[in-house]
Image: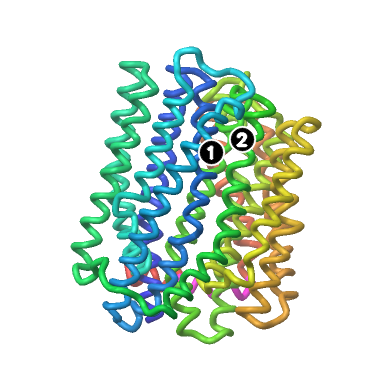
Amino acid sequence: MEGNRVGNASRNIFFGMFLKGYQIILPFIMRTAVGFYLGLSYMGLNSLFGSLLWMLSIAELGVGSAMVYSMYKPIIDKDEKTICALLALYRKYYRIIGTVILTVGIIITPFVPSLIKSDVPDDINIYVIYGLNLFCTIMTYWLFAYKNSLLIAHQRNDIGSKVMLVTNTAQYALQFVALAVFRDYYIYLIVAIVTQIATNIVTAILASKLYPNYQPKGELDISVKKSINQRIKDLFTMKLGIVIVSSSDSIVISAFLGLAILGIYGNYYMILTAAMGIVKVVFDSCMSGIGNSILEEDEEKNYIDLKKMTFIIAWLTGYCSVCLLCLIQPFVKIWQGEARLLDLSIVICFVVYFFVDEINQIFITYKDAAGIWHEDRFRPIVTALVNLSLNILTVNFLGLYGVILSTVVSVVFVGMPWILHNLFTTLFKRSMREYVFKLLFYTVVTTFVSAVCFLVCNMITDTGILTLLLKGVICTVMSNVMFLLIYFKTKEYGQVKSLVKRIIKRA
């Protein structure tokens, strides 16, 4: 069984990384096209409505996570009847969710203009743009979204990756035509809606072909349904917290600083989320395997796996942090021009935010895989409210510094200690002292390596694409050699090295 988990995770990581690289390059091209053909304010609108509609997705309540978790055991037991009943319940819930999002979205429509301080383009109707974005969001829930749970629970995320590869190609090609030929933002959004519909339909068809025995039919026992509903209630605060943290920054910037500043912030945040997306592929690919291991393996084995996962993420996140610190400024200068650069101190804040967020994702992944939602139900909302309060208090005095640092402070001093306590008292049932010292060690190492690489890259004063590539090579070689020299005697390095050899052998 462990071999299957490793094989599935390896395949998912491979296809996920391929798709993520693709999804980094093409959205970057599209964002460049939006800025070039339409202007900075439209880039700000993209960021604002993305955040606003993500906030509306609070109606999802974490149903997806609860349903996928509920499928782990029936899949292990080959209980087709229960899986079919779960699909039927999932379909019902998602139809309700889509309707709720539509209703709430319509209710808040009159208040949308108040979220924009200034810089609204003259040639668009804010309400129409908002309506198109809203429709695209609800299509996500109404059209066979529940089918994707089968792929996730069976660790076949690679199927969805392949579908998105095809549909995203069509989407970006048509959107580029809409911008370059017609200069029309409305067509740009309509293409996104059509593509979302196509993605859901094709994914559902493939899921049905791969698992033809699983159809949405039947009823769950009242006790099972009650257990699922309890998980959803517990997940509500987690979903609310994630939505507030993810969306409040853009909304606060738009309301207090304007669309132009939000557009510049969005350029940096897009690069940041690209790096986050690369690391997220690892988390998503391993989630079901971790959940399966928690059900089948003992506590000691799962704790060892946690330390291995932390080591992998610390190394990967450390490397990404080095690249962000050293390359983001020269890259944005080439891409957008010197006038759209932020201060280096803000870039450092972004890098700290990135590192903290990815380490925190380790704990969230284990918490979700283990279903520790009831014990963790208050942490996300408290963390989010601290973040939002600090955002509003500091944005007028510190500007973007306040927005970014508010998130870091809320996660480091509220969220992370709390979730670690929940994990080690509920799942691992041991002192977390050893693990915390490892986290501090990885943090110090990443800080040291980042500083050294930054000083070396800063010695190169030339600008241009070739210089950027040279700095990229320096970051890649120097950081990984330094990580290797520092980590190679650790127990986790030996364990991960053996794991990598197994994966290569299987490949």
Residue farthest bottom in this picture: 298
Instruction: Give the percent coordinates (x, y) of residue 186.
Output: 37, 24
Quarter of the figure with the N terminus: bottom left
Tell me the tag on residue 52.
Answer: 1
**Label 1 packing within 10 angstroms: few (<14), some (14-19), many (20+):** many
Q: Give the range drawn in magenta.
A: 489-499
Q: Quick one: 329 or 464, which is closer to the camera?
A: 329
Q: Do the residues labelled 2 and 1 touch (CB within 8 Å)?
A: yes
Instruction: Give the percent coordinates (x, y) of residue 158.
Output: 33, 58
Q: Quick one: 67 or 21, which is closer to the camera?
A: 67
| Residue at the image point whose x is 41% and y is 67% from the top | 68
Q: What residue type is labelled 1?
A: Leu
Instruction: Give the percent coordinates (x, y) of residue 13.
Output: 40, 59
Of the numbered discs 2 and 1, the one sitting upstream in the chain is 1
Q: Quick one: 245 or 224, which is closer to the camera?
A: 224
**Label 2 packing within 10 angstroms: few (<14), some (14-19), many (20+):** many
Q: Quick one: 406 or 502, which is closer to the camera?
A: 406
Disc 2: which residue: 251
Quarter holding residue 362: bottom right
Tell me the tag on residue 232.
Answer: none
Residue farthest right in this picture: 397
Image-based side of 369 in relation to 25, left or right: right
Q: What residue type is labelled 2?
A: Ile
